[in-house]
Amino acid sequence: QVQLVESGGGLVQAGGSLRLSCAASGRTFSSAAMGWFRQAPGKERAFVTAIRWSGGNTYYADSVKGRFTISRDNAKNTVYLQMTSLKPEDTAVYYCAAAQRWPYNRSDRKFYDYWGQGTQVTVSS
């Protein structure tokens, strides 16, 4: 069984920065891709970004391109989400996800196998 634990969420003013971390643990771990989703109050969980574990190819939702950066540390089994120029509309619970196989549709949550518990990010104006 694989466990994902997010950290780094909190309160930040508009225009500020925040970095989230997602640590993967388990007796064995192998993931083709990891990603971040977010869910704002009253809305569906939406795709933010994903990264291929091998190769490091990255993909972003249009709403965060140029502001968010995803990266990973293979040795630590950890993926990061660096968020800059934060806006109030970025406020949401952010979830880390992992896919054992490369997702057929990277933005569709049903292709991911493991999920973290989520961490709250609140951006004030």
Image (cartoon, helix red, strand yellow):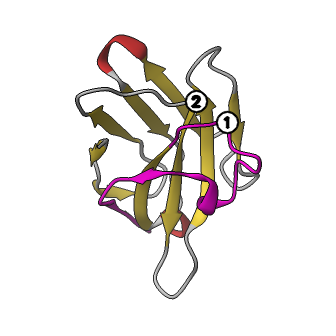
Magenta residue check for 120: yes
Does 77 lie within the magenta span? no
Which structural element holds mark 2?
loop
Per the rendering, the mark at residue 32 is 2
Residue matched to label 1: 102
Q: Residue at x 29, y 34 (%)?
A: 23
Point out the stretch of residues depicted in magenta: 99-125
Q: Position of residue 16 (x, y in %)?
A: 42, 46
Instruction: Look at 62% across and 37% down and name the residue there.
Output: 101
Q: Would you identify the image quadrant in which residue 19 lies?
A: top left
Q: Is residue 39 above or below residue 27?
A: below
How dense is the environment of label 2, judged by Cα within 10 Å: few (below 14), some, or many (20 and up)? Answer: some
Could you tell me how far apart the alpha carbons at marks 2 and 1 are, in whole angstroms?
5 Å
Viewport quadrant of the C terminus: bottom left
As drawn, 51 above or below 84? above
Q: Is 64 on the left-hand or right-hand side of 96?
A: right
- Give the position of the N terminus as an image quadrant: top left
Name the residue type under label 2.
Ala
